[in-house]
Image (tube, coloured by chain):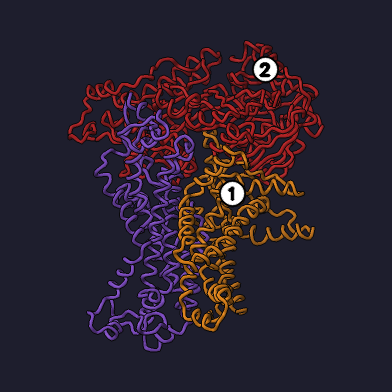
Chain colours: A orange, B red, C purple
Amino acid sequence: MLTFTIRRLVLAIPTLLFISLVIFLLLELAPGDPMAQVPLTVPPEVKEKMREALGLGQPLHVRYWKWLVQFFWIEPKVLIDYAFNTSFSADDLRVISWQTRSPVMDTVAQRMPQTLWVVGTAYVVGILIAIPVGIYSAYRQYSWFDNAGTFVTMVGFSVPPFFSGVLVIVIFSVQLGWFPSIYDTTHRVTDWSSFLAQVNQMIMPVMVLALQITSQISRFMRASMLDNLNQDYVRTARAKGLRERSVILMHVLRNSMIPVVTVIALGIPAIFGGAIITEQVFKVNGIGQLLIIAIQANDLPMVQTLTFIFAVLIVLFNLIADVLYGILDPRIRYD
Amino acid sequence: MIFKPLMLGMIASLALATTTIAERGSDGNVSIIYWQAPSILNPFLSGGTKDVESASLVLEPLARYDENGELTPWLATRVPTVANGGISEDLTSITWNISPGLLWSDGTPFTAADVKFSYEYCTHPEGGCAFLTKFDGVTNVETPDELTVVVNFDKPTPFPYGPFVGGESPIIQAAQFADCLGAKAPECTEQNFNPIGTGPFVVDEFKPNDVITLSANPNYRDTAKPAFATVTFKGGGDATAAGRAVMETGEFDYAWNLQLAPDVIAQMQAGGKGKPVAGFGPLMERIMLNQTNSDPALDADTRSTAKVAHPFLREPAVYKALSLAIDRPLLVEIGYGQAGRVGCNWIPAPAAVNSDTFKCDVQDIPGANKMLDDAGIVDTDGDGIREKDGVPLKVLYQTSTNAVRQDFQALIKQWWQEIGVEAELRNINASVFFGGDPGSPDTFQKFYADVQMYANTFNGTDPQSYLGNMLCDKAPRPETQWQGENISRFCDPAYDALYAKLTETAGADERAAIARQLNDMAVASGAMIPLVHRGRLSAHANTLGGVVLNVWDSELWNVADWFRKEGS
Amino acid sequence: MAFLIPVFAMTETPLEIESEVSTVEAEPDKPPRSQWVDIWQQLKAHKGAMVGTYLFAFITIGVFVGPFIWHIDPTYLPQGRDFIDLRDTRPIYTLIWDSQAKVSWAHPLGTDNLGRDALARLMSGGRVSIAVGLTAMVLSILLGTIIGVVAGFFRRMDGSLMRLTDLFLALPLLPLILVASLLFRDPLSNSFGTEGGIFILIVVLIGLTSWMQTARIVRGDVLALKEREFVLAARSVGTTPVQLIIRHLLPNTLSPIMVSATLGIATAIITESALSFLGFGFPPDFPTWGRLLNDSVDRMVLYPERVLWPGLMISLTVLSVNYLGDGLRDALDPRIRGR
């Protein structure tokens, strides 16, 4: 398994380079103009000059090379400088966003906390609810609990967050006034009461997101459990006189985890990617909102960098999932 | 000039706004929400209005427009005119006198050198300054002494109030930006995010595309202002959420530019925490009529260019009938409510240049039908669509994606159907539609459609450069990489000649008269169908006092005068 | 289809295996039953599946046949005086609790802010949404299953196919759509008409950008399954890889595929509305459920029915497909079947 992991990690480098090239070409090919949001009163000649100032006049391969150098060479240097107070990166030009004219990675670092707070919490809450619900639903298939669970999760998944988000705002912020409708990203958690305030403003976005995540994962959990509950080994285990609890939780659960692990592993890069619509609805202004604003403003360096970071996470977590398969089911071999 | 009459009166009215005697910072925090989040606080490098307006909390110009569109001295002592000797007799130079004793927020004195530096910064050839046109025709800026700035133009300039006037041409500090000229401009993140200004507030923290926190400027010129100690300027989301946060939940004090249907606004207002305010600039929602043929069968060098005329949209009976079939009062009621008025002109404001030639507030479908019948444009093959010389009156009607615009499309499509014109609707994402990518077929400049709807406006009160949009050579075409402002490809030598006359005319009244004539020519020859004169609708909390909505300049122009009302 | 299945899928007792051979042996007095007849019998006995089937059939017939009974044009706007009278009418059931409500018997579900009939829009929106949802889901499930099985089963293909999956997972959807509509919108509109072209574009795009999860899940299952004894057994009797996949591996990965399919419909319907909302989808006068929902969110408090009905229809469709999928899964599972 170790050689497999190392081989995959080495292979990941050309893969990621190729992905970055595809993303770059895709963004180049897409119609769009970083000047689209400049007021119409600014004449075209001026807009042309502004484009030149952004470096848009340079040929394609030069810009791609510049980005590669900036991302793989200069940004790590900046990180080292930041960590050890050195000054390797003195005058190097970092990846600069076209909208803010500031280093992309600084903005990403700034956005990470609120995204992890909200989307990360929602993910944890979602998984913690989904797995027991999925197990119990399968164990008591077609019981009232299972049917209610099916109904809630299906409706939960069918209702898009642009609607459910606004619905909870109308109910809990406008009518009841319990929670704020706008997330305060400047809020700092310093003591118990500020922590409570943080929880207070997180409840609604977490609720909306967790519903979606729970729906998805609990369905896969249930289906996978159902597949395994009728297997021979379950009967054997019961026949051996094992407690029902350990049959279900030790044997069946472990064998049912493969699809669930896949779904969870695919979802973790999405945590870092933020939840575009939910972040917009509650003004969480995390990574998801950063990405959508950058796409709308055609801020190519920002979009390129963000998507590439997601690509790295996707490759990484899919690798982790593959390793986990091997642990969950030792029969799985990759080489 | 329009500002001539009430110079003193205006100063008095500014003083009036401060009647609630308050101490600086006594009213706590004010929170502002813009549904477009500011990306940068340096307006010269900005990507849009959001950045200019947020920066206006910090940076200020020498003079700006007030809520009536009249010039008001800001950092200068007076508005220069020919009468007061501020503008030279030959109209080639303007002299500004800076108010003495002004300090930057870091405590250093504000001098003429800073003003000159702002000019140099913006006009640097590699800087990519967004408001370069403010300095059109400027040959140099002189600073005879610390408090005097002379701007020289290359030719007589009847309207010399471009440089250093309004939120789009503020003064930045020379000391801070000295190393940020030209190609280095984008590298100065610290400066671009935390500009030092003369305005009422100082940036504490700027989180790009998210939130700005500011606090009162300790060196602000009026020691009693601003009333608020801190400002939270939140960005992002959508107009609905911003309106809700001010008028329904009361979490925020001020929400900018709520482009929402009137019934939605009314429902929010019923929340009782805030109220909408509207103001009218020259923003005009219109349908542009393509004068050229956009048939997809034509090759790329010919399609939508002056080489082939449109098969029917140049026919007066057609475009007049199309206009007559529209029920503008209903459009206003559905789409804009108190933030809209029936509009018959291309240039609806300021009042002096608003022509009264046209009447368009009554829908007349039978009249439109008759007009087309009389012109011999009738339905010959019985499919319900009229034909002109065998070409059926089918139009592709495109616009940007926006709830109100899609409602308008549906309504107008139905009305045109009643007069035998079939419309195919298309909506295009705004960032593509208004983007100038010559590779995209969907930009409004390329106009690969017969008619398209959008709104446009101009800055300040002088429409000269805006009127220049209809000149023949401003038409987007392949040779110009599809750039250009003459979207409808309107071309009339008489118009070009009259425009040339405008550029040489000095008197305000004569200029207004020519502007009205140019407006009439463009509208009467069917370059566009004006629909709605749109206002700006923002909302403020009931507890927030001192708000004066200004559509001629930044909405936050008088934020120093804002205060918390008693009993709240 | 019931050709030779010596060992069906699992190492169950041969008696429970419903193949022609074994049924003939076990029950000689009955005529041999096809496997599919058996599945159908099983499905019919499944209560949830039947409810799902009827509900889905009802919705589908409603949206496809409904417009022939309910003649109002979903894009028709009342003119003149009528416009004011007929816009913003409430559904007639509002009368139950509010006798003052503005209702019109001609418009049982009310009208929108431009006076368009809500029922007609719901039906014509449903046509598009169901068509988009089903087609895109089928496309994505097909792609995902094929890629997942191939990657899981053939070791040599695994690396390249999974890297392809990583690539697709990483691609940002919006720029992809922009590029696709730039390149293909006009050619497609020319060959299939404006709406047909956009339909194909949207379905293919949603399909192409949503198969990855299914592929990863199926691959994970196949990786585990192919090491099981029954696969070895099947191989040892000379089953070809293709048969092995079709007869043995696929039926065992069916349940996650069914879940993906159910969730896929909901995702496709909602993605379509997001695309239309952003201006990349159908023309603006073309209602779909997602779009109706989206357009009405602003007026949710004043006119709750405008969000309620489209939201309910999406949920019911997904729910019905879910129960149908549950039933199918049970019916296709040889271990549950016949009990």
**Is C307 on the left-hand or right-hand side of A169?**
left
- The amino acid type, in three-letter code, at marker 1 is Pro
The local crowd at label 2, few if under 14, some if 14 to 19, many if 20 or more residues have their Cα within 10 Å, is many
| The one of C199 and A228 positioned closer to us in this rendering | A228
Q: Badge 1: few (under 14), some or many (20 or more) residues near its Cα, within 10 Å?
A: many
Tell me: A212 left or right of B52.
left
> Where does the N terminus of chain B fall, quadrant-wise?
top right
Which chain contains the residue that carries disc 2?
B
Chain under numbered label 1: A
Residue under label 1:
A205
Q: Position of residue B211 (x, y in %)?
A: 66, 41
The secondary structure type at the circle numbered 1 is helix
Q: Position of residue C167 (x, y in %)?
A: 51, 63
Q: Residue furthest bottom?
A: C236
**Could you tell me how many numbered marks the image carries?**
2
Residue B80: give its label: 2
